[in-house]
Image (tube, coloured by chain):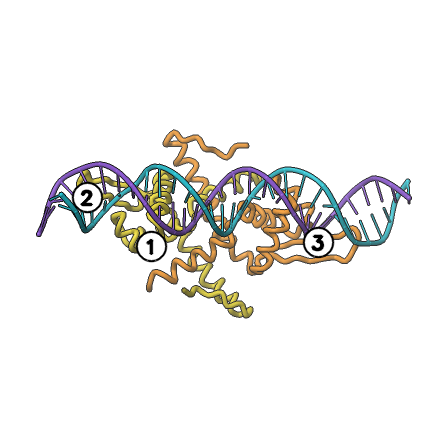
Chain colours: A orange, B yellow, C cyan, D purple
Amino acid sequence: MEMQPELCRVEDALSILVGKWKPIILLTLLKGGTLRFSELKRRVPGITQKMLTNQLRELEEEDIIARKVYPQVPPKVEYSITEYGKSLEPILVAMHEWGTSHTLHKMQKGNRTICEK
Amino acid sequence: MEMQPELCRVEDALSILVGKWKPIILLTLLKGGTLRFSELKRRVPGITQKMLTNQLRELEEEDIIARKVYPQVPPKVEYSITEYGKSLEPILVAMHEWGTSHTLHKMQKGNRTICEK
DNA sequence: TGGTATAGTATACAAAAAGATACTACGGAG
DNA sequence: CTCCGTAGTATCTTTTTGTATACTATACCA
């Protein structure tokens, strides 16, 4: 097994998760199921409309989330995780778990960068 | 279990892995063991000295890698993954595996963005 | 005396990502 | 006739990341 391809693959997964808002969006959809744009926006505090649209488009392109448009006025668009997107869950969970112990680790070293507002 | 803290933790892990060179550096050290600065630089093609120093400093601050300086001339500095840093391996591996199947998934959809030079 | 090797710094610049803000379309309610 | 709500676009500015290039210290070697 050589090195190059391996590295390349990690970057692949990373590029999907990276973006200031993608993990939050994915976790929100994993927990919340199918959500409309506005609902998603409410559940991801601080995100701007532009950023949300933007990140959703990128995730959609990778077939991680599905977008369903209802031809209504006012518009209704629903987003959900695809089956394929669900395969990311273990990574997200692993990262969450790691992050949690990392926080403890940092606290033990006197570094108080906790998840605070 | 609420949402906020969970999200925060994922970001925590992510922030350590993110950076154009960090996964590559980590995998190189995981595979290569203890390496000198120059050796590391050779094994991560394309990285500039500044970026390497930079990323190593950040990883060191998070206690993911250890830096050992030998008071010699010319200088000798060795880098290695800490025990703590090794706990990231499962995440890296999960990402690699996911990335591999993601590539297949994309190929099946006619998208040929493969790991090529 | 000058060149080599190592592990950096310093500075300037370019590119990418994120943020702020304003604008649009459209049908229905009043 | 005007305002509301939804799901966006369009621009512009700021911040963050990354790149390129040059420079440093110092012992050793010829």
**Residue named by callout 3:** A77
Between marks 1 and 3 in the image, the one whose residue lies nearer the viewer: 1
Give, as a three-letter code, the residue at label 1: Val
Image x and y of residue B18, in percent = 44, 47
From mark 3 to mark 2, how far is it between C-alphas?
63 Å
Identified by mark 2, the residue type is Pro
The reply to whether discs 3 and 2 touch (Cβ–Cβ < 8 Å) is: no
Same chain, marks 3 and 2? no
Q: What residue type is labelled 3?
A: Val
In this image, A6 relative to A22: left or right?
left
**Of labels 3 and 2, the one closer to you:** 2
Mark linked to residue B44: 1
The residue at the point 52 percent across, 57 percent down is A87
Dot 3 lies on which element?
A: strand
Measured in 3D between alpha carbons, the distance from the residue under mark 1 to the one under mark 3, in whole angstroms, is 44 Å
**Numbered badge on residue B74:** 2
- Is A35 in front, or is C25? C25
